[in-house]
Image (cartoon, grey):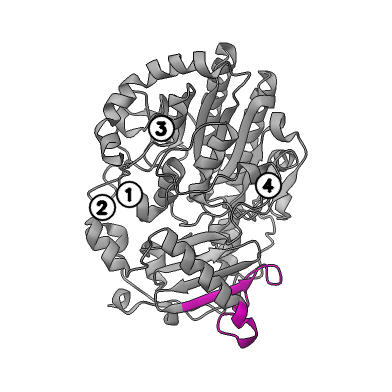
Amino acid sequence: MAEAYVTNRRQFLATASLNAVAARGVLGSPTDRPSVLFILADEWRAQATGYNADPNARTPVLDRLAGESVNFQNAVSGTPVCCPYRASLLTGQYPLTNGVFINDVELKPKGVTWGESFARAGYQTGYIGKWHVYGSPDGQYGRRLAYIPPEKRFGFAYWKACECSHEYNHSLYYQDNDPTPRYWPGYDAMAQTDDACAFIERQAKARDAYSLVLSLGPPHFPYATAPAKHRALYEGRPIQLRPNVPPEHRAEAIEILRGYYAHIAALDDCLERLLGTLERTGTAENTIVVFTSDHGDMMRSQGLTTKLYPWDESVRVPFLVRYPRRFGKKTRAAASPLNSPDILPTLLGLCGLAIPDGVEGTDFSRAADGHGDANGRGALLSLPVPITEARKFGFAEYRGLRTGRYTYARSIAGPWLLYDNRQDPYQIHNLCGQSKHRDTQSRLDRDLNAMLKERKDEFLPAREYVSRAGLGHYREVNVPVGQVKSPWGDWESTMAPELAK
C-alpha cells in the first residue's frame, strides 16, 4: 500500500483541489469543522515562558494563551533536531521509520502526510516559513536555499517557504510555483505573521476551514538579530541563570540568553497579531490554535550548547492547544508526555478526521479533553546518530524515556542517566546505578525495551544507520569527535568506541 501511495503521489497532488471541492459537500461548512493554526517556533525550550515562571521571559500574550489552553506540560521533542522533528510532525512517524534521523536528509514519505490528510478532507492548506525536509543530498547544505517543487510540499497548497535560512533580516522564500527567490521585508517573523493574518482573513471571508502551519525561525541563533526595540529590552539587563549552568560558562550564557529572550519577546508580539486576527474575524471560537517548538536549546545548561541531548532544556517544548468550542477558555494541564509523532494524530483526532495508515504516534485528543493519559510509559527519547555538537562533546547514540516524573536514558554503552524531575527539576543529581533507585531504573528500562520493540528499533551503532542510508558523506556526521567534561557528569563513559576512532 505504501509503495502504491508513493507511485501515485503526483497524481494525488494534481487532484487534491477537486477532492477538496467534493469534500466540502460531504463534510459540511467550516461551522462544523474547526480550522487549525499551528504556530511553530524554532529552538524555544519549554522553560523559557512566563507561564512556566521564567523571570527573564517577557511573554504576556503567550501567558494569556496558556491561561485559555490545554497545556501539555510534559511535551517533548523525542529526537531534538530540526529535520527529524519536522519529518515526524508531517508523517506522524518516528525518525527511523520515516528515514530522517539527521539533518538535511530528504523526506520521502511512505504514507499520507499532514497537508495531504487535511487537503483530502476539504481543508484549505497553507505553509509559511521554514520547511527543512526537502533535504540536501550532497550532505553539504546545498539545497537549503533551493526552490522546492510542488510534489515535495506534500499537500500544502498555499506556499511561502524556504528550506532553511536563519538570516532573519534578509530572509529568502519562494511563493507557490514561482522559482524566483523573494525576500521577506524586515524581520521575517513579523512579515510571515502578517502573511498568516492575511491568509486567515481570506479564509474567514470564504468560510473555508483551513490548516495553516506558520513555521518561524527564531529564537534559534543567531541571537543578536531581533528587532532593535526587542534587543533594547535586554541590553545590560541581569539574567537569572538556571542552577545547572556551570560557573565557567555563566558569562557566555548570559550574553546568549539576552539575544534569545529578545527574539522571544518579538515572537510574543507576533502572537498578539495572530490571536487578534482570529478575534477580529470572528473565527477564534472554532479554531484550534497550537503553539509549540521543534526542540529546545541547552544554552550552556549542563555546560552544553544547542540541542541533541536528553536533558529537559533540549527535549521539553511548550505545547499549548486552545480550542474554545470544545475546551472552553479555562487553562487545564495535561500530564501526558506527548511526543513529536503524536502531534499529527492528535490534531486529526480533534478535527474528527481519519488517521492514516502508517502513523505511529498516539492520538492524545481524549487526553486533551481531560480523559486521562493515553500512554503511561512516557515519551521515547532517541538520538540514533550523534551529529555536530553531540560529536564535539563526545556523546554516544542513546535511547530513553521522559515520563511525567522521570528521565531515563541508555547510551549504546549501557545505562547512563536517571533523574527524578520532581525532586531535581534542574537534573543535577544523576541517580543511575544507585542501589536505592534500582527498582525505578529497572521498571523504566523494561518500559524502554518494550517501546523499542514496538518501534522495531534495534538500537544499532550509529555507523550502521549511516551506512544503510548512504549518508557517510554528510558534513554533520563527520565532525571530529572531541571530549568536554561538565561538573554535572562524565561524558567519557558515554562515548561509543566506534565514534571515538
- Label 4 secondary element: strand
Farthest front residue in view:
1
Mark identifier at residue 139? 2
Q: How many marks?
A: 4
Left or right: 312, with 385 as reference point: right
Horizontal and vertical percent for residue 420? 65, 72
Mark identifier at residue 161? 3
- Decide which of 457, 154 is in the foreground and name it: 457
- Asked if residue 425 is among those painted magenta in the image, a careful observer would answer yes
Q: Amino acid at mark 1?
A: Asp
Q: Earlier in the sequence, mark 2 or mark 3?
A: 2
Q: Residue at x 55, y 84 (%)?
A: 433
For the residues labelled 1 and 2, say whether their Cβ atoms are less than 8 Å apart.
Answer: yes
Question: Label 3, label 4: how many angstroms apart (C-alpha)?
Answer: 28 Å
Q: Earlier in the sequence, mark 3 or mark 4?
A: 4
Report the mark closest to the observer, 1 or 4: 4
Question: Label 3, label 1: how many angstroms apart (C-alpha)?
Answer: 16 Å
Q: Residue at x 40, y 24 (%)?
A: 157
- Mark 3 burial class by Cα count in 10 Å: few <14, some 14-19, many 20+: many
Q: Earlier in the sequence, mark 4 or mark 2?
A: 4
- Mark 4 burial class by Cα count in 10 Å: few <14, some 14-19, many 20+: many
Does residue 339 lie above or below 20 as drawn? below
Report the mark closest to the observer, 4 or 2: 4
- Label 3 secondary element: strand
For the residues labelled 2 and 3, say whether their Cβ atoms are less than 8 Å apart.
Answer: no
Horizontal and vertical percent for residue 501? 27, 77
Left or right: 63, with 359 as reference point: right
For the residues labelled 3 and 4, say whether their Cβ atoms are less than 8 Å apart.
Answer: no
- Decide which of 420, 11 is in the foreground and name it: 11
Q: Which residue is mark 1?
A: 104
- Which stretch did the figure color magenta? 415-439
Q: Amino acid at mark 3?
A: Ala
